Amino acid sequence: MSEVRFENVTRRFDTKNGHYESLQPITLRIPEGDFVAIVGPSGCGKTTLLRMAAGLDFPTTGGVIVGNKEVSGPGADRAVVFQQFALLPWKTVNENIAFGLKCRGVSAAKSADQVAHYVSLMRLSGHEQSYPHQLSGGMQQRVAIARSLILDPQLLLMDEPFGALDAQTRIEMQEELIRVTAERRRTVLFITHSVEEAVYLADRVVVMAGRPGRIREVIEVQSVRKDEGWDVKPVEDVMELESFVHLRTQVWRLLRDSGAAQPQADNRRKLSIAS
Ligand SMILES: Nc1ncnc2c1ncn2[C@@H]1O[C@H](COP(=O)(O)OP(=O)(O)O)[C@@H](O)[C@H]1O
Ligand SMILES: [Mg+2]
């Protein structure tokens, strides 16, 4: 049970200039097993929404429901991969990947096979005993992804997880991510700056606009995969498809429109905190 529902979610930040309403009421339903990508300009509230689903931040009004429970904090049913991967510097690659399982009481002997599987999946073979400082940024990021995937969470929350990867590794990781999550019908909420990545990975792309953050449109992408009759297809083949090109253009237009249609007026309302 990992349907996600944002219901009339707003978030107000109190700053030294007064209150800042960062989100207009957001209502979004992510059905169980769906892969949803969010794109939108910086500062439109993508990370805030993801943190709310993770239970690391809370709406000012409205509610976030995962499964049939209102989110009140982090939970074992959810795993988060942040842009800034926080690995444990004193632990090896293997130990970092096994860490979550260890916290759940799984012995190293028991988790060894699974750890080896994810090491190989994330192309980390040969680096099992390395420490994070001995790895490139891209490799550290793959350790962070492996550490989340190994927990096999019902809901996977990823905030620009592939940002530090080189182009080739990024494509490999995208394909693996579709495979892993489609196979197990996991629900994924995935934030990215890349329109191509969003359209390639997702069943649905949520296009947001900024100031205040709101949903511009939700675009169904699933149809491309269904029409073509495949689950995972090499990204370079997909990019050639007319349907892919069409969807990518549609998302780009929406992003551009949401910038142009919006006067650059700052909505930081200078309310007196005393009032
Ligand atoms: N802790 C905070 N205090 C004040 N403002 C914040 C805080 N966190 C986020 N914001 C503001 O809320 C808006 C949305 O932020 P964020 O969710 O990080 O956007 P995105 O991930 O889309 O770039 C931004 O304008 C940001 O400055
Ligand atoms: Mg962000």
Image: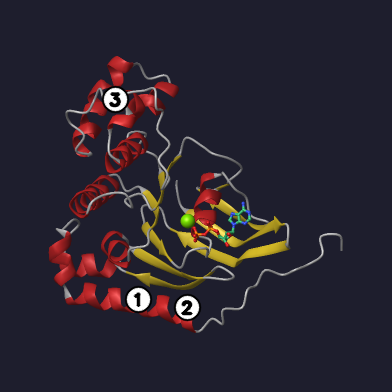
**Which class describes the residues within 10 Å of circle 1: few (<14), some (14-19), or many (20+)?**
some
Q: Which residue is mark 3?
A: 94
Dot 3: element? helix
Give the residue drawn at x 37%, y 66%: 205
Give the residue drawn at x 51%, y 45%: 54
Give the residue drawn at x 28%, y 34%: 135
Q: Nearer the viewer, mark 2 or mark 1?
A: 2
- Identify residue type, mark 1: Trp
- Residue 221 figure quarter: bottom left
Q: Which residue is mark 1?
A: 252
- Identify residue type, mark 2: Gly
Q: Nearer the viewer, mark 2 or mark 3?
A: 2
Dot 2: element? helix
Tell me, yes or no, whether the two marked residues, 2 and 3, touch with CB atoms within 8 Å: no
Tell me, yes or no, whether the two marked residues, 2 and 1, touch with CB atoms within 8 Å: no
Q: Quadrant of the C terminus?
A: bottom right
Q: Which residue is mark 2?
A: 259
Give the residue drawn at x 56%, y 78%: 264
**On the picture, is 250 further left or further right than 155?**
left
- Identify residue type, mark 3: Asn
The spot of residue 180 in percent (x, y) is 26, 45
Compare marks 2 and 1 and give the one earlier in the sequence: 1
Task: Give the answer, above or below, for where 85 lies relative to 37.
Answer: above
- Residue 104 figure quarter: top left
Compare marks 2 and 3 and give the one earlier in the sequence: 3
**On the picture, is 275 further left or further right than 60?**
right
Dot 1: element? helix
Tell me, yes or no, whether the two marked residues, 1 and 3, touch with CB atoms within 8 Å: no
